[in-house]
Amino acid sequence: MTTVSAIALFWVALGILVCYGATQLGLGSVTEPGSGFIFFWSGLILVILSLMALAESLRSSEEIAQETGEMNWVKIGLVLLSLVLYAFFLERLGFVVTTFVLLTFLLSWIEGTSWARSLGVASGAALGSFAIFELWLKIRLPKGILGF
C-alpha cells in the first residue's frame, strides 16, 4: 500500500465518522436543515473525493514521489496575514467585498494566476457563495458598506 492510499483511507474513515456524527445531531430536510445537515453533506463529499483519490492511487502501479522543495515562508506569511485581515475586515466591509478581495489576492499574488482569471473566479465565488448562503439558505452574512 502506498502512502497516498493510506492517506486516502484515513480521509475516507474520517468522512464516514463525520457522517455518522451528523446523523446523531439530526439531518432535517433541505427546507428545514437540522444541526447535522451541513456536516453530513461535507462528510459525504469528503468520502467521495477520498475514494476517488484512493482509486487513482491504486490504479497507478508506481509510488508517486512528490518533492516538497523548500518552504516559501514569505508566501505562507502572506496567506496567514491575509486570513487575519479577512477576519478583521469581514464585519466592516461585508462578506462579498472581503471575500472578493481575499480570493483575488490569493489567486493573483500567491498562486500567480492572471488578473483577468483571478477577478473572474473571485467574483464568481463571492457572488455564488452569497447566493447560496444568503438567498437560498437564508443565512445572514455580514452586510458591510455596500449593504449586501
Image: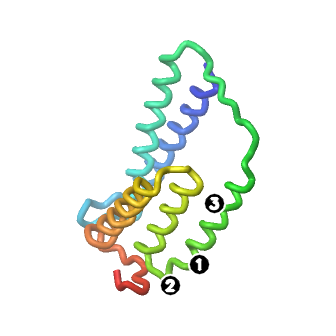
Image quadrant holding the N terminus, namely top right
Give the residue at x 49% y 49%.
18
Residue 26 can be seen, yes or no: no
Q: Nearer the viewer, residue 6 or 104?
A: 104
Identify residue for label 1.
88
Residue at (50, 50) in percent of width and height: 113
Which residue occupies the extreme front position in the image? 115
Compute the Cα span from label 2 to label 3. Answer: 20 Å
| Residue designated by label 2 | 92
Callout 1 environment at 10 Å: few (<14), some (14 to 19), or many (20+)? few
| Mark sitting on residue 65 | none
Q: Position of residue 41 (x, y in %)?
A: 38, 51
Q: Earlier in the sequence, mark 1 or mark 3?
A: 3
> Toward which corner of the image does residue 136 lie, by quadrant?
bottom left
Return the x and y of residue 120 as percentages of the image width and height. Answer: 37, 58
Q: Along the polypeptide, which appears first: circle 2 or circle 3?
A: 3
The colour scheme is rainbow
* Element under disc 2: helix
Q: Residue 27 falls in which quadrant of the image?
A: bottom left
Q: Amino acid at mark 3?
A: Val
Q: Distance between the Cα atoms at labels 1 and 2?
A: 8 Å
> Are the two marked residues, 1 and 2, in contact with CB atoms closer than 8 angstroms?
yes
User: In this figure, which residue is indicated by the disc labeled 3?
Assistant: 79
Q: CA distance from mark 1 to mark 3?
A: 14 Å
Q: Amino acid at mark 2?
A: Arg
